[in-house]
Image (cartoon, rainbow, N blue to C red):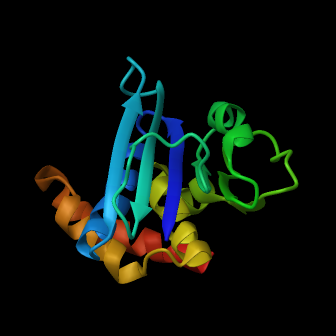
Amino acid sequence: MKKNIIIAGFGGQGILFAGKLLAYAAMKSGREISWLPSYGPEMRGGTANCHIVVSDEPIGSPIVTNPDILITMNTPSLDKFEDKVAAGGMVFVDKSLVLRKVERTDIKVKYIEATKIAMELGNAALANMVILGAFLKETGLFIVDEIKDAIINNIPKTKQGLAEIDIKVVTAGYMS
């Protein structure tokens, strides 16, 4: 098993944190993992993406050129990465923020009102956790408990109070 994943959006949307959670969950489950973050010079509002490779065998390169899975949290990211998704791959779209539909017909697309659901749960900044929950349900790559453990062990000490709500929001995304 090998999955190439790109998570992309604006800085401040928790793109890198979501990728870090997947990397941690993969590592804890004994899989090989590569996590390569990338962000623009503007920390918040600039572009951010991360490449994640999860495999049962050693990983040769951390660069993902043709992702099996794309999670996109804004229109510029969909514009940049849609054509790179491998045929038969999956794209997860934050329907609340992405202003267009996926044009390709050779990939599976899941539209999630991630930002809207996060706002209804009290914090639009948790849209990354909503879409991560939907990703878990659709791919089966991880179980919710693995991501819960990743949240608890990776949330910064200054934000430990958010672990419980992050877990609640991931669960809501899984149920959406």
Residue 45 seen by the camera: yes
For image coordinates 61% across by 56% down, the residue present is: 68
Position of residue 26 in the picture relative to residue 88 (left or right): left
For image coordinates 17% across by 52% down, the residue present is: 156
Q: Residue furthest left?
A: 157
Residue 115, x across and y down, in percent: 58, 53
Compared to residue 53, the image places residue 14 above or below, namely above
Position of residue 64 in the picture relative to residue 36 (left or right): right
Which sits in the foreground, 50 or 93?
A: 50
Q: Quadrant of residue 99?
A: top right
For image coordinates 37% across by 54% down, the residue present is: 59
Compared to residue 38, the image places residue 19 above or below, namely below
Which sits in the foreground, 86 or 133?
A: 86
Q: Residue furthest top?
A: 41
Which sits in the foreground, 151 or 25?
A: 25
Residue 136, x across and y down, in percent: 51, 73
Residue 21 seen by the camera: no
Quadrant of the image containing the C terminus:
bottom right
Q: How many marks?
A: 0
Position of residue 25 in the picture relative to residue 120 (left or right): left
Residue 120, x across and y down, in percent: 55, 63
Compared to residue 114, the image places residue 75 above or below, namely above
Position of residue 93 in the picture relative to residue 145 (left or right): right
For image coordinates 45% across by 69% down, the residue present is: 169
Residue 158, x across and y down, in percent: 13, 50
